[in-house]
Each structure stands twice: as C-alpha cells, then as structure tokens.
Image (cartoon, rainbow, N blue to C red):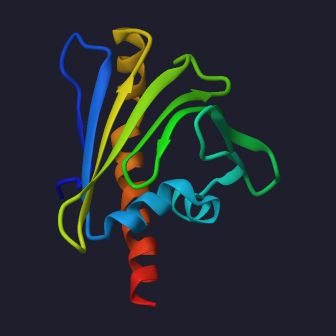
C-alpha cells in the first residue's frame, strides 16, 4: 500500500522534502500542529512546552509504561504565521543527528482539503542519510494517518 506522506530525498543533498494532502480544512490542519492537546493526541507524546510565537520554544517527551523517558526533543520556533508557516529547529536528545531546521508550509487546496509541505535541512548529507536508515518515513506516515483520523473526527462533531 502506497504511503500518503511522501518523503523525497535527492541523492547527495542534505535535506528532505515531505508532502502530504489531508482531507481537512487548512484551519484544522494548522491547529493539529499548533495546539498542544492536539499535538499530544496524534503524535502520541507529551507536550512539555509549545510557545507558538516568533522566538518561542517547544519541548516534547515520550515515556514508556514504567515512566522511563524513551524520546525527548526540543527546539526554537523562528517564525510562526497562523495557517501559513512554522519555521523551527528540531533536536532529539541522545541522537547522533544534531539540530535540524524545519520549514512547514500549510496550503489550502479547497474548503475541505489542505496540504503540508515540509523541508527539513540536516547538518550534513551523512546526518540526513542516518535519519533515513530509521523507519522515519513509515513513522511519519503513521503519525499523519493518526492526525487525519483524529482531527477529521473533530470536524464531524
């Protein structure tokens, strides 16, 4: 089955281009990325901080059933334009990838559909390729599927 989230990695480049169309109005897609309660639901992680403003910061953390932290990431929000764009850094704790720069652009397609365009820039081609060795694309596609399902139910209610 073809994944709905497309990850394009051009050989020799240190970035990824990610696109996904959603059966969601632009407003709801943007809220899924900017409202802590919604982020927690579709990402399956705890939002410790999410300051949606220029020069704001964010921090996410996931723990296992015993309370051990298994994932922690944080960054700085450099640009926040509602229903248009989020530019931020992303850094995973205890990972060999270093800081990455993410450009998220939100596009209205119709009254009920929208598109997310992401460009992620890594410090090097090697770091990008290390990320691609992980089940990154599959995990992102699964998270986006949850986003579509969860946020899609909001527009029904």
* Rendered view: 67 above or below 88: below
10 horizontally vs 5: left or right: left
Give the total of numbered labels.
0
Quarter of the N terminus within the rendering:
bottom left
Residue lying furthest right: 67
Position of residue 8 in the picture relative to residue 65 (left or right): left
Q: Position of residue 9 (x, y in %)?
A: 23, 26
Q: Position of residue 53 (x, y in %)?
A: 60, 42
Looking at the image, which residue is at 60% across and 47% down? 52
Q: Nearer the viewer, residue 79 or 6?
A: 79
Along the viewing direction, whichever of 17 and 50 lies nearer the viewer = 50
Residue lying furthest bottom in this view?
Answer: 157
Residue at image point 34% right, 11% down: 125
Whole-percent x and y of residue 70?
69, 41
Q: Which residue appears at 49% of the width and 54% of the height?
A: 33
Residue 18, image x and y in percent? 28, 39
Compared across the picture, whether 76 is left or right of 21 comes to: right
Q: As displayed, is residue 7 above or below residue 15?
A: below
Asked whether, in this view, residue 68 is left or right of residue 51, the answer is right
Q: Quadrant of residue 104?
A: top left
User: Residue drawn at (18%, 61%), measured in percent from left and top?
Assistant: 109
């Amino acid at each position: 089955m073809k994944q709905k989230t497309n990850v394009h990695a051009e050989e020799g480049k240190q970035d990824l281009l990610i696109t996904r169309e959603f059966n969601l109005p632009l407003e709801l897609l943007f809220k899924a990325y900017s409202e802590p309660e919604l982020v927690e639901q579709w990402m399956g992680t705890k939002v410790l901080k999410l300051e949606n403003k220029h020069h704001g910061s964010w921090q996410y953390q996931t723990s296992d059933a015993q309370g051990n932290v298994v994932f922690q990431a944080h960054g700085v929000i450099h640009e926040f334009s509602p229903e248009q764009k989020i530019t931020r850094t992303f850094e995973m704790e205890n990972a060999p990838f270093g800081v990455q720069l993410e450009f998220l652009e939100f596009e209205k397609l119709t009254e009920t559909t929208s598109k997310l365009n992401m460009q992620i820039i890594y410090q090097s081609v090697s770091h990008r390729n290390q990320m691609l060795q992980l089940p990154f694309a599959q995990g992102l596609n699964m998270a986006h599927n949850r986003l579509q399902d969860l946020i899609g139910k909001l527009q029904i209610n």
